[in-house]
Amino acid sequence: MRLSVGASLTEGLTFLVNGDVHVNDKPVKVGELQIWEVSNTSLMDHPFHLHGFFFQVIEENGKAPAYMAWKDTINLPPRSKMKIAWMPDNRPGTWMYHCHIIEHHAAGMMGSFEVIDGDNPNKETIASPTHHHHIIK
Ligand SMILES: [Cu+2]
């Protein structure tokens, strides 16, 4: 996912996820490891916050982090990139992530996605990790 800041004639700055505001992201499946790449291409900090789940940063700007820890928020400094891993446990429904700066969140720097029930008979059984690219410009 790409967090970015755009210029808007009417509103000054807009705060974007993947070039858009209030994004509807792809669904994820219960029990399927998520590897997300979150990048900040803007010149300001954006603390990335995932609702309801804890993740581990597995890469910081292409390097292994100094230590592993469970987090639900990480700050993305200007022009930085993090790879995070997390596991959707069995709490299907609509979840969201957003910039933890309330003004950025309110201006649209957020996304929502469905966690799909693993026991649903319509579920596809795919074991490979899903890879989302999220860029913050
Ligand atoms: Cu922000």
Image: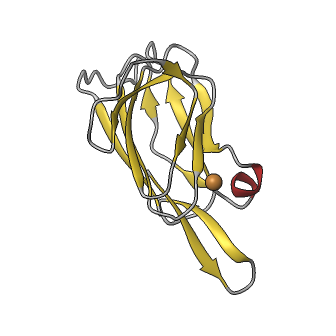
> Front-most of 43 and 3?
43
> Front-most of 43 and 106?
43
Q: Residue at x 40, y 18 (%)?
A: 68
Residue 51 versus residue 108 in the image, above or below: above
Residue 51 versus residue 103 in the image, above or below: above
Residue furthest toward the front?
A: 66
Tell me residue 26's x, y (percent): 45, 44
Tell me residue 25's x, y (percent): 50, 47
Dividing the picture into quarters, in which one does residue 135 lie?
bottom left
- Disc tally is 0
Residue furthest toward the left?
A: 128
Q: Residue at x 76, y 49 (%)?
A: 102
What is the basis of the colouring in this image?
secondary structure
> Front-most of 92 and 122?
92
- The answer to whether 119 appears left or right of 91 in the picture is left
Q: Residue at x 47, y 24 (%)?
A: 55
Tell me residue 45's x, y (percent): 58, 53
- The answer to whether residue 134 is visible is no
Tell me residue 31's x, y (percent): 39, 16
Dividing the picture into quarters, in which one does residue 96 lie?
top right
Q: Residue at x 46, y 18 (%)?
A: 69
- The answer to whether residue 53 is visible is yes
- The answer to whether 93 appears left or right of 4 in the picture is right
- Quarter of the image where ligand 1 sits: bottom right
